Amino acid sequence: MLRTSLRAIPFRCHCCLSRRRFLAACGTACAAGLASSALPKAFGESGAQERRLKIRVMYSLHAPVQDRPDWPNIGFDFRPVMQKIETALREAYPDMEFFPAMASGPEQAKKIVDEDNTAGIDGYIVWQMNCWNRVVQTVAETGKPCLYVDFLFAGSGGFLVYTAGFMRQGQENVGAMCSSKMEDFLAAVGCFRKLREGASAAQVAAAMNRLRVERTPAPGDLTCKADSCTVLSPDETLRRVRDAKILAVGGGWPGIVEALDKELGLKVVRVEFQELNQAYDQADKDQAREIASNWQKSAARVADVTFETLVDSARMYLAEKALLKRHGANAITINCLGGFYGGHIQAYPCMGFHELNNSGLIGGCECDIRSAATMVVFTAMTEGRPGFISDPVIDIATRQIIYAHCVAANRVFGPNGPANPFEILTHSEDRKGAAVRSLMPEGYMTTTLEIAPERKEILFHQAKSVGNSLEDRACRTKLCAEPVGDLEKLMREWDRWGWHRVTFYGDLKEGVFALADRLGWKVTVEA
């Protein structure tokens, strides 16, 4: 969800520990990192007689037990995860020594790396456990071989953005792995053995990347169910876009607002939190209770969300509608995370966005104006189909991209189309408020997009919907899809475009390219 890095907790412990002491320390006062003044006996020390390779295993995370809202979620206990990783490494590679450490940011990572310079460390494994802890960049600067790993549904935003950046910059000593299978990670670790054969750091990383490609399954059956999606002409689409207006509450992006107006005639109006709060306070409470009751009855399941919380969400929905009416707009995007975490708003807007998107209007997350504008354009093109803003995750083990967020419509074919089941759960990252898990239909072609009017560019890929993940980590709705095209290519655009993508049900390819031709824009096919 386009989250900026929250301020990291400083280390209170800078000693490298044995495995037993390390795991014990994770549950005590050492809340953010372990560094080394001298390397002790490592947890993989028994084994072959030849010199064992020394590999630093660095976990990029806020704290062993997460103390703030972020992926995967507040309160998440990383200690069993780290123990599982270390046990697997010790059993698979008795000819290597592994030295665990934690770093919450570049300062802590640099302390560890500086001490490693005199300790004979041969290579690094960096696990991205939270999204935006910039640890791997410091490790990459050592020039030593580095295996960069995504803890799926936890570090995926940073992993995708940082990996794409490494690819674009030609960072040759970093290999990447994003898989739900431990076996894929362990196979990549085996590439460190090439150092004994005289391989360079670049050759080791290249072997890791080749292995990622080799272990990605071949495409499955990408035949999709019939879907009579209406795709309007570019001229009609643009006519409707020029009649649209986006309200941006509590934030904004420099540069894009002017470009949207110039290129598309799409207006953006900035609104302060105060105006939204006034509308919230004025919302009819009886009407809000009726809406909340309807949500409760319609949901397949409600878990950990009280009725009063649903009433608050319904008041926020009524406030959103009041602002749209007041400003003559059809789209609203709210700085929901900053607003709720900072106490600027009293309820999450997720349920309201769910209701707006089901009705052909636009409710967009996080004051992401680019994604909200993408929703406006292609909801217009498809006569009302909702866009699903997401934070994607890539899993090579299943050859899937998983689109994850806590807001989603459950009428993916438009306001007059069939409804799919949905659940009401807490917002995932802080386990508060009310959010949506939409269980979207399988077997259909989807089109995923972002627009960049300031660059005159549209980002585009397609995928077949194949299921819904119920994994508890990260956002509530998780639509699993198999990309049409090259999964490897799909790794390469995140640094230019950011993490968010907007997914629509339907084959919009012809309409997307026709619109780009009409505007004189470029389409970047990312898969």
Image (cartoon, rainbow, N blue to C red):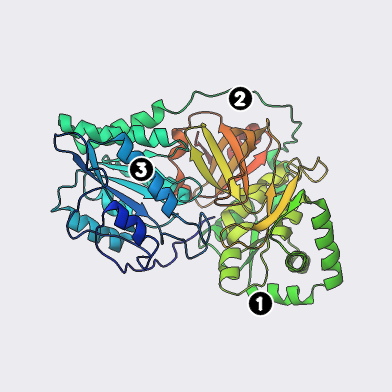
From what the image shows, is residue 180 above or below residue 502? Answer: above
- Disc 2 element: loop
Q: Quadrant of residue 505?
A: top right
Q: Nearer the viewer, mark 2 or mark 3?
A: 3
Q: Residue at x 31, y 54 (%)?
A: 20
Instruction: Give the residue type that dot 2 points to.
Output: Leu
- Which class describes the residues within 10 Å of circle 1: few (<14), some (14-19), or many (20+)? few
- Which class describes the residues within 10 Å of circle 2: few (<14), some (14-19), or many (20+)? some
Q: Quadrant of residue 506?
A: top right
Instruction: Give the residue type that dot 1 points to.
Output: Gln
Q: Calculate the distance from the C-alpha at mark 3 to the C-alpha at mark 1.
A: 52 Å
Q: Are marks 3 and 1 in contact (CB under 8 Å)?
A: no
Q: Residue at x 47, y 37 (%)?
A: 490
Q: Which mark is residue 222?
A: 2
**Residue 52 % position (x, y):** 18, 38
Circle 3 is placed at which residue position? 87
Specify the quadrant that holds the N terminus.
Answer: bottom right
Q: Residue at x 69, y 72 (%)?
A: 276
**Residue 482 % position (x, y):** 57, 32
